[in-house]
Amino acid sequence: MKRGKKYLEAAKLVNRGNLYDAGEALAIVKKAATAKFDETIEAHIRTGCDGRHADQQIRGAVVLPHGTGKTVRILVFAKGAKADEAQAAGADYVGGEELIPKIQNDGWFEFDVVVATPDMMGVVGRLGRVLGPKGLMPNPKAGTVTMDVTKAVNDIKAGKIEYRLDKTNIIHVPIGKASFTEEQLADNFQALMDAINKAKPATLKGQYLKSVTLTSTMGPGVKCNVVKLAGN
């Protein structure tokens, strides 16, 4: 894969054989984010879990203290008073059954997160095939299937992110933008790692955190020292 000049320049900041402390890694990632747009800073966490076992599935959500720096568009499936509540809380779109053909047939995806009240899950379930692969299916563990739609909307707008294992047992999450200060990124990263450490499955044998890499959208990856990140 041919790399651009900017990437190669940024890569010089990283010693490939090194495992960095989180603060140092974030400083390098921030410095290496030289694109013309405000790059997203991401954490990629490789775990020792086997997601094929239900008891080793990791899924949850955490509110990042300084948000993600991204404006999140929220769709709420609710009816009656709960629909009014979602609207009042600032949801971008609120609806029910009538949205099914719009999403299924017209390919409407002008939203980043889907929240649903439990009584609407029968309706939302019919969208499983299209929402599932995009990681948009509401889930009680992530707090997106709830009667408290006000809290759900407020938390998401405040910077709540969802984390989950992908097929290769890696968790990929944004922790902010390159324009954030190192302190803001460090606070967000710490909040994420606290949540991930708490989510460690009781049945897991062996090492939980295999590797933690921080990177920006266009920049090189910087590996962290996992020993210092693992919760004891």
Image (cartoon, rainbow, N blue to C red):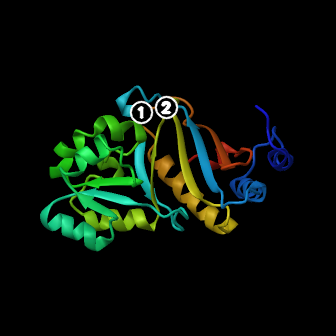
- Give amino acid for label 2: Cys
Which quadrant of the figure has residue 156? bottom left
Q: Count residues near mark 1 (Cα–Cα under 10 Å), then give few for <14, some for 14-19, many for 20+.
A: some
Q: Which mark is residue 56?
A: 1
Which quadrant of the figure has residue 160? bottom left
Q: Is residue 65 visible?
A: yes
Residue drawn at x 72%, y 60% is 36
Q: Earlier in the sequence, mark 2 or mark 1?
A: 2
Residue drawn at x 26%, y 66% is 86
The reply to whether callout 2 and callout 1 are in contact (CB within 8 Å) is yes
- The span from disc 2 to disc 1 (Cα, nearest Å) is 6 Å
Q: Position of residue 195 (x, y in %)?
A: 47, 52
Q: List the residue tagged with mark 2.
A: 49
Tell me the quadrant of the picture where the N terminus can be found. Answer: top right
Residue drawn at x 21%, y 60% is 147
Q: Position of residue 78 (x, y in %)?
A: 20, 58
Q: Is residue 232 visible?
A: no
Q: Position of residue 186 (x, y in %)?
A: 63, 62
Q: Is residue 75 above or below residue 202?
A: below
Task: Find the residue positioned furthest to the left.
Answer: 80
Which quadrant of the figure has residue 58? top left
Q: Is residue 174 above or below residue 64?
A: above
Determine the secondary structure under disc 2: loop
Residue drawn at x 34%, y 38% is 130
Q: Nearer the viewer, residue 23 or 147?
A: 147
